[in-house]
Amino acid sequence: MTQPISIIAKALVRERQRTGLSLAEIARRAGIAKSTLSQLEAGNGNPSLETLWALCVALDIPFARLMEQQINTSQVIRFGEGPSVTAEMANYKAILLATCPPGARRDIYLLITQPGEDRHSKPHNPGAVEHLIVTQGRALIGPTDNPIELTAGDYICYPADQPHVFQALEPDTHAILVSEQN
């Protein structure tokens, strides 16, 4: 699994280069030391939520963009894993599961499923993606040729523009489905 600081480092460099501003200027706008930003861009350090928010404001980007990875395949995040940041001033931890690309539409569903009633889905529109979080039970989920077993708290993201399946492995398996269409 990629470490959050590695994801953040790549995003900081990418977004700073996008703005055309210097390291010193972004640090000044964020109210942090230039050396701190330099270390973060190098993949060192453990930035607080407040520092990351200040950098997002300076870069004029949504917070989630700092933690997004470019993924065009299935992605699984087990419960308790995933890129996260912790606040300095509160007992608060945010774990990013997915961001929404510009112009995308998302529909959210609660799934209540039973074993023996597998859901085989045909490919959706090109570029469609599905995100699922199992909230109760166990299920085999993902592309038909490579579904992955998930349990309560696990997350999966996969291309929905290819055949895919949801197979409950326990009675009363529940999940949250987010269907994303471009």
Image (spheres, rainbow, N blue to C red):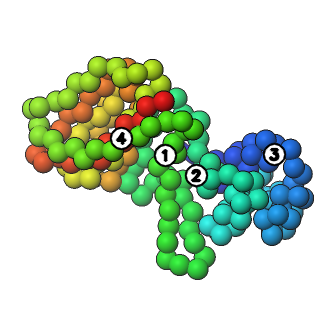
User: Dots 3 and 4: beta carbons under 8 Å?
Assistant: no
Q: Is residue 107 above or below residue 73?
A: below
Residue behind mark 3:
19
Mark before the other along the chain sequence, 1 or 2? 2
Q: In this view, does 105 lie to the left or right of 65?
A: left
Question: Which SS class for mark 4?
Answer: strand
- Amino acid carrying mark 2 in the image: Ala
Dot label at residue 64: 2
Which badge, 1 or 3, comes first in the chain's sequence?
3
Q: For mark 2, does the 10 Å Cα neighbourhood hold few (<14), some (14 to 19), or many (20 or more) residues?
A: some
Seen at 60% across and 76% down, the residue is 88
Q: In which quarter of the image is residue 131?
A: top left
Q: How crowded is mark 3: few (under 14 residues within 10 Å), some or many (20 or more)?
A: few
Q: Is mark 2 on a helix, strand or loop?
A: helix
Q: Which amino acid does label 3 sit on?
A: Thr
Residue 107 shows which numbered tag?
4
Nearer the camera: disc 2 or disc 3: 3
Up-down relation of residue 94 to residue 77 (above or below): below
